[in-house]
Image: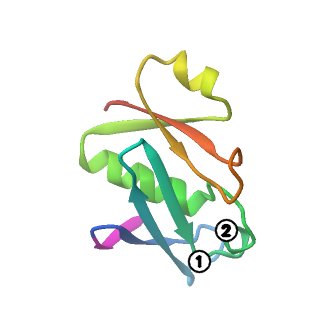
Amino acid sequence: MARPINHNTLVVESVTNPLANHVVTVQFDDDHHVHARCTCPWAVHNGVACTHVIAALQYLAQIKGRRLSFWLTEEEAERQKHRRFYLSGQAEHDGVWITSRPG
C-alpha cells in the first residue's frame, strides 16, 4: 500500500514487516527516465526497482488510469507498443524498462 506525502514522495508499507514503512521519492525526466529512491535496505545498497518503488510507481500510474509492466530489456518493452520509460539505477545500464498502458 502506498500513500502520497507530496508531489514526488510516497510512503509504502512493508509487506514483510507491517510495522515498517519506507519512503520512496520519484522523479520523471523529460527524456522518459524515472529516478526513484527508497529507504529500504535493498535499495540503500544500490538495488534497483525494489518492491516499494514498484508499488509507488503502480500507485502513481493508477491515479492517472494507467497500468504498468516492467521489462529487463528495451527490446521486450518496445514489443509492447506502449509508452516506455526507463527506471535508472546507479550504473548506466543498471535499470528496468517500464511500459504504460490504459488501465
Q: Are marks 1 and 2 in contact (CB under 8 Å)?
A: yes
Crowdedness near tag 2: few (<14), some (14–19) or many (≥20) residues, C-alpha within 10 Å: some
Q: Residue at x 38, y 72 (%)?
A: 9
Residue 39 circle label: 1
> Where is the N terminus found, in terms of image quarters?
bottom left
Q: Residue 31: horizontal and vertical position, in percent?
A: 41, 42
Q: Residue 103: horizontal and vertical position, in percent?
A: 31, 32
The picture quadrant where one finds residue 82 is: top left
Cα–Cα gap, marks 1 and 2: 7 Å
Read off the magenta span: 1-6
Would you name the residue on which mark 2 appears?
A: 43
- Kindly tell me whether residue 1 is visible in this rendering: no
Q: Residue 30: horizontal and vertical position, in percent?
A: 35, 46
Per the image, is 71 magenta? Answer: no
- Kindly tell me whether residue 21 is visible in this rendering: yes
Q: In this view, which residue lies farthest toward the left?
A: 64
